[in-house]
């Protein structure tokens, strides 16, 4: 396997690399919902881009000390293709690196996590096979009970992946229930502020604000005849049907699990309890599948108080997300559209150019190509740092590529247009203000005319 580019991940003083072909986004660490009885390497579930993924600790996959998930540099990396249901929790992401094939040593191994060594400056980067380390978790075989004409037999859990679906398994009382993972938007801890609603149905706990959206919270336990019990494991599942959003309070999350069609028994028309859509056979345990009609009934029963949130409807007409690279200059955060960014590299010496514009720091040589380095610090009147290990963001421009020194690269994020405010600056440098963390974090988005950044301020 030829590796063209890697993302470098740091653990203490050790550097690891992951092929960028497998990587989706790099995000700050969101709230993590722990899972009972999950593999040691699984940290829990988290919401990413409107979906729910299983979060794996990159350190634990390699037999290292676990990532705290609380440090400022910790990040979550989403994965692509067949691993899109997974994400990695890592200590620190530094930079992506295009591989010069004479600097990489491929190891002749088939049963090891490290498949290559990259020689980069004075550092040795160990390239990790995600397929191997994640496959080591999935390869644990568990015998399952399959039902054939109401008799059971031991069956190997080797059903083809296309016959399987992912379900969130949770508890109410002493019973286990399941919902298809695709029907969930996110999962929240129950220790949130909920405003009671007078005159509502018995199962309604109240209403909460979720990122400028009002969401009604129903106690699913009451709806299914269980006595609610408060505890630190209580969770709220956010679901959406059409343009209606509803939060469901449950006792605790058990697991996220793949089940095949053969594991599911439909109860059919003889089912008197329309709240149960079927039964999943998981070894010796039976898991009740929450029916779509039960959720629809809850929504209909409380339609007078559930607010329509048209901006959150997922469908063909949903506004396209805008991907940006967020970085720091001084104490403020700025962003480039991902379409303008060619690569991000480590600090490298710059050669000054005689008679160049005051906004040009010089030039650098990247793999035989001369790239002009502009100064965003000078352009914006920001003090140039002297004690910061800076990065260089290389951008596309009409007349070639242009690089800019930045203090640090914070994130690569997909931004909902609803988080952006049109606010073009007088000098034309910025086109939008991005509102993150419920407006507590403001990021200025540079406009698409990158060349303009080299022009002197008026």
Image (spheres, rainbow, N blue to C red):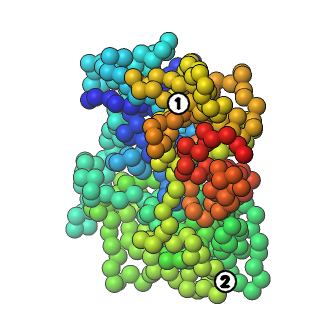
The image's mark for residue 395 is none
Residue found farthest to the left: 149
Asked which secondary structure carries label 1, the reply is strand
Upstream in sequence: badge 2 or badge 1: 2
Q: Residue at 71% across / 69% down in the picture? A: 208
Q: Residue 200 in the image: state x and y as whole percent.
A: 71, 84
Left or right side of 279 for 313: right
Q: Residue at x 52, y 19 (%)?
A: 14
Closer-to-camera residue (17/188): 17
Can you identify the residue that label 2 sits on?
305
User: Please, which residue is most extreme toward the front here?
Assistant: 355
At 69% across and 67% down in the image, what residue appears? Answer: 212
In-front residue for pair 20/141:
20
The local crowd at label 1, few if under 14, some if 14 to 19, many if 20 or more residues have their Cα within 10 Å, is: many
Quarter of the image that includes the N terminus: top left
The answer to whether residue 61 is left or right of residue 336 is left
Are circles 2 and 1 on residues that touch, CB within 8 Å? no
**In which quadrant of the rendered view does residue 238 lie?**
bottom right
Q: Is residue 244 above or below residue 439?
A: below
Residue 348 at what x, y percent from top left?
55, 21
Q: Is residue 340 above or below residue 183?
A: above
Using residue 364 as the reference point, say whether residue 216 is left or right of it.
Answer: right
Residue at mark 1: 372
Residue 121 placement (x, y as % from top left): 48, 14
How far across and how far down the image is residue 144, in percent? 31, 51
Residue ID at (75%, 36%):
382
- Circle 2 Cα neighbour tier, 10 Å, few/some/many (<14 / 14–19 / ≥20): some
């Amino acid at each position: 396997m030829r590796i063209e580019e890697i993302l470098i991940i740091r653990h203490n003083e050790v550097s690891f690399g992951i092929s960028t072909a497998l990587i989706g986004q790099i995000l700050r660490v969101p709230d993590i919902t722990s899972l009972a009885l999950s593999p040691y390497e699984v940290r829990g579930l988290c919401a990413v881009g409107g979906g729910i993924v299983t979060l794996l600790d990159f350190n634990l996959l390699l037999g290292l000390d676990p990532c705290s998930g609380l440090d400022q540099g910790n990040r979550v990396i989403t994965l692509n293709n067949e691993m899109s249901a997974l994400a990695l929790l890592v200590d620190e992401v530094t930079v992506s690196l295009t591989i010069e094939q004479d600097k990489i040593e491929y190891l002749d191994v088939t049963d090891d996590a490290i498949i290559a060594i990259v020689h980069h400056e004075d550092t040795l980067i160990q390239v990790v096979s995600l397929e191997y380390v994640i496959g080591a978790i999935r390869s644990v075989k568990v015998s399952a009970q399959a039902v054939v004409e109401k008799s059971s037999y031991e069956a190997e859990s080797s059903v083809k992946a296309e016959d399987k679906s992912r379900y969130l398994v949770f508890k109410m009382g002493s019973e286990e229930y399941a919902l298809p993972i695709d029907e969930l938007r996110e999962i929240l801890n129950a220790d949130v502020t909920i405003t009671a609603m007078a005159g509502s149905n018995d199962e309604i706990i109240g209403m909460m604000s979720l990122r400028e959206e009002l969401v009604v919270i129903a106690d699913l336990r009451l709806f299914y005849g269980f006595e609610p019990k408060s505890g630190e494991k209580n969770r709220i599942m956010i679901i959406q049907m059409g343009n209606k959003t509803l939060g469901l309070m449950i006792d605790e999350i058990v697991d996220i699990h793949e089940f095949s069609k053969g594991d599911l028994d439909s109860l059919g028309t003889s089912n008197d309890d329309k709240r149960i859509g079927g039964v999943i056979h998981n070894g010796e345990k039976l898991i009740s599948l929450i029916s779509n009609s039960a959720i629809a009934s809850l929504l209909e029963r409380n339609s007078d108080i559930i607010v329509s949130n048209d901006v959150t409807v997922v469908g063909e007409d949903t506004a396209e997300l805008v991907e940006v690279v967020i970085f720091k200059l001084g104490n403020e955060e700025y962003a480039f559209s991902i379409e303008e960014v060619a690569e991000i590299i480590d600090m490298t010496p710059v050669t000054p150019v005689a008679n160049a514009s005051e906004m040009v720091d010089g030039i650098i040589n990247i793999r035989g190509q001369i790239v002009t380095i502009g100064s965003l610090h000078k352009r914006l009147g920001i003090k140039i740092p002297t004690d910061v290990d800076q990065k260089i963001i290389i951008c596309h421009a009409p007349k070639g590529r242009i690089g800019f020194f930045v203090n640090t690269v914070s994130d690569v994020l997909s931004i909902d247009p609803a988080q952006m405010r049109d606010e073009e600056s007088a000098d034309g440098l910025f086109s939008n203000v991005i509102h993150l963390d419920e407006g507590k974090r403001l990021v200025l988005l540079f406009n698409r005319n990158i060349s303009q950044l080299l022009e002197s301020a008026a």
